[in-house]
C-alpha cells in the first residue's frame, strides 16, 4: 500500500500541474513503468485450494497435471483483456473508458441579455442559493457531504477566484477556502492589496468529494450551472482559476498549467487567468514565485498596487 500511496501522491502532483496523460504511451497504453508498478501493487492471486476437487483453477497455473494453463482473471495492462471464463466477453480496460469532454463555460449558455445591476446582485445570489436548496442533483450529495459550500465575498467584486471543491474545513463551516489552503489564499489576496471581503470566492463543485478526490465529470458538469450563474451575477472583471481542475471546466480544455498560465483567456465576458491552487503551493512552495507572477498580471489589469511594507 505504501507504493500505491506514493503513486497517488505523484498523480495528484502532476494533476495540479495540469498533466493528465503522462502515464500513457502514444498509442494510449500504459507506460512500462506504470504497468510494472501495477503488477507489483496488484499482484495476481496466489490462492491455492487444499483440494483440486471442485475448486476453481489457480491464476496462471495448471490446476491438474496435463490440463491447459488457466487464463488470467485480471484485465490485461497492455490493451485487450482476457476473459475470466470461456464464452464470456473480455473485461473492460479501465484505461480505455471514455471520459466526457468538458464544455467551455462560454458554450454552456449565452450571456444574459439583461445584466444584474450591482445593487441587486446580493439578492440575486441569495435567490440562487435558495434555488440550490439541499441539493441532491449529483452523487456527491450521498457521499458524506455535510454542508453545501455556495460561495463568499463581495457580490459586485471586480476579482473572482474559482477553486476545485470544498475540503473538510469548508464542508464543516459552509465557507470556501477556510483551511490551510484558504489561509494561503488570504495571504495571496492581501499581497495584492485587497481584503478577502473585496473579492468573490467559489468552487467548481459545492459539495466535498470523498477524501478530497478530484470531482468526477458528472459531478462537475452537474454543478457547473450554478457557478456559471454566480459568475453572470457577480460579473467580475477578472476570474482567477486556481489549479488544473478549475481551468479544465471553465475553459473546456485539458492542458498543462504551463500552457494555460501567463496569458488571459475569456470566460463569461470576464478575463480569466490560470494559476496554481493554494493547496498545491503548500505541497510545492517552490512554485509560489510563479504564482506571484500570475497575480501581478492581474494586479496590472486592475490597477492594484501591493501594500507598503512597514
Image (cartoon, rainbow, N blue to C red):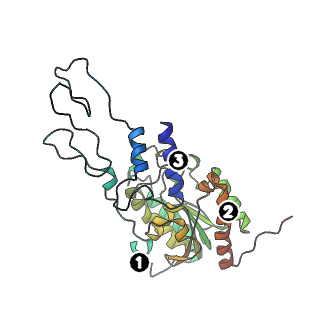
Do the CB atoms of the residues marked 3 and 1 lie less than 8 Å apart?
Answer: no
Label 3, secondary structure: give it.
Answer: helix
Q: Residue furthest right?
A: 310
Mark 2 is surrounded, within 10 Å at the Cα level, by few (under 14), some (14 to 19) or many (20 or more) other residues, namely: some
Query: Is 70 on the left or on the right of 242, as rendered?
Result: left
Instruction: Name the image quarter holding residue 28.
Output: bottom left
- In the picture of the structure, the residue carrying the numbered disc 3 is 9
N-terminal label among 3 and 2: 3
Which residue is disc 2 drawn over?
A: 196
Identified at 51% across, 67% down, the residue is 230
Residue 36's place in the image compared with 157, above or below, is above
Q: Position of residue 14 (x, y in %)?
A: 52, 56
Q: CA distance from mark 3 to mark 2?
A: 30 Å
> As displayed, is residue 119 above or below residue 52?
below
Report the front residue among 277 and 97.
Answer: 97
Q: Which residue corresponds to the image point at 52% horizontal and 43% vertical from the top-left?
A: 6
> Which of the marked residues, 1 or 2, is nearer the chain's N terminus?
1
Please give the name of the residue rendered at 72% of the width and 64% of the height, measured from the top-left corner: 190
The spot of residue 231 in percent (x, y) is 51, 70
Determine whether the residue tagged by mark 2 lies in a helix, strand or loop. helix
Position of residue 212 in the picture relative to residue 68 (left or right): right
Q: Which mark is residue 194?
A: none
Q: Quadrant of the C terminus?
A: bottom right
Across and down, in percent, residue 92 comes to 26, 49
**Does any portion of residue 189 appear in the rendered image?**
yes
**Vertical relation: 214 (above or below) 122:** above
Marks 3/1: CA–CA distance: 39 Å
Q: Does residue 146 appear anywhere in the picture? A: no
Of the pair 200 and 272, the residue shown nearer to us: 272
Of the numbered discs 3 and 1, the one sitting upstream in the chain is 3
Pointer 1 residue:
110
Amino acid at each position: 500500500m505504501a507504493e500505491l500511496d506514493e503513486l497517488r501522491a505523484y498523480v495528484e502532483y502532476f494533476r495540479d500541474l495540469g498533466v493528465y496523460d503522462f502515464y500513457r504511451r502514444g498509442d494510449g497504453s500504459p507506460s512500462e513503468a506504470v504497468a510494472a508498478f501495477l503488477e507489483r501493487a496488484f499482484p495476481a492471486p496466489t490462492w491455492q485450494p487444499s483440494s483440486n476437487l471442485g475448486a476453481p483453477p489457480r491464476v496462471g497455473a495448471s490446476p491438474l497435471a496435463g490440463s491447459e494453463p488457466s487464463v488470467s482473471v485480471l484485465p490485461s495492462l497492455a490493451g485487450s483483456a482476457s476473459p475470466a471464463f470461456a464464452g464470456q466477453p473480455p473485461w473492460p480496460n479501465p484505461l480505455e473508458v471514455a471520459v466526457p469532454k468538458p464544455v467551455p463555460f462560454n458554450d454552456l449558455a449565452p450571456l444574459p441579455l439583461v445584466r444584474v445591476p450591482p445593487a441587486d446582485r446580493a439578492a440575486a445570489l441569495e435567490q440562487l442559493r435558495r434555488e440550490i436548496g439541499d441539493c441532491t442533483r449529483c452523487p456527491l450529495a450521498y457521499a458524506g457531504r455535510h454542508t453545501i459550500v455556495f460561495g463568499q465575498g463581495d457580490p459586485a467584486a471586480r476579482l473572482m477566484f474559482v477553486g476545485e471543491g470544498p475540503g473538510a474545513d469548508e464542508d464543516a463551516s459552509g465557507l470556501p477556502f477556510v483551511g490551510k489552503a484558504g489561509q494561503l489564499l488570504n495571504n495571496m489576496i492581501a499581497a495584492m492589496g485587497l481584503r478577502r471581503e473585496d473579492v468573490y470566492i467559489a468552487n467548481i463543485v459545492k459539495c466535498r468529494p470523498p477524501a478530497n478526490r478530484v470531482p468526477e465529470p458528472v459531478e462537475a458538469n452537474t454543478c457547473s450551472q450554478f457557478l456559471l450563474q454566480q459568475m453572470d451575477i457577480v460579473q467580475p472583471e477578472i476570474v482567477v482559476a486556481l489549479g488544473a481542475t478549475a481551468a479544465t471546466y471553465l475553459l473546456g480544455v485539458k492542458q498543462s498549467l504551463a500552457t494555460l498560465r501567463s496569458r488571459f483567456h475569456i470566460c463569461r465576458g470576464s478575463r480569466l487567468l490560470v494559476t496554481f491552487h493554494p493547496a498545491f503551493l503548500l505541497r510545492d512552495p517552490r512554485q509560489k514565485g510563479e504564482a506571484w507572477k500570475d497575480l501581478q498580471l492581474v494586479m496590472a489589469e486592475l490597477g492594484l498596487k501591493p501594500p507598503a511594507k512597514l
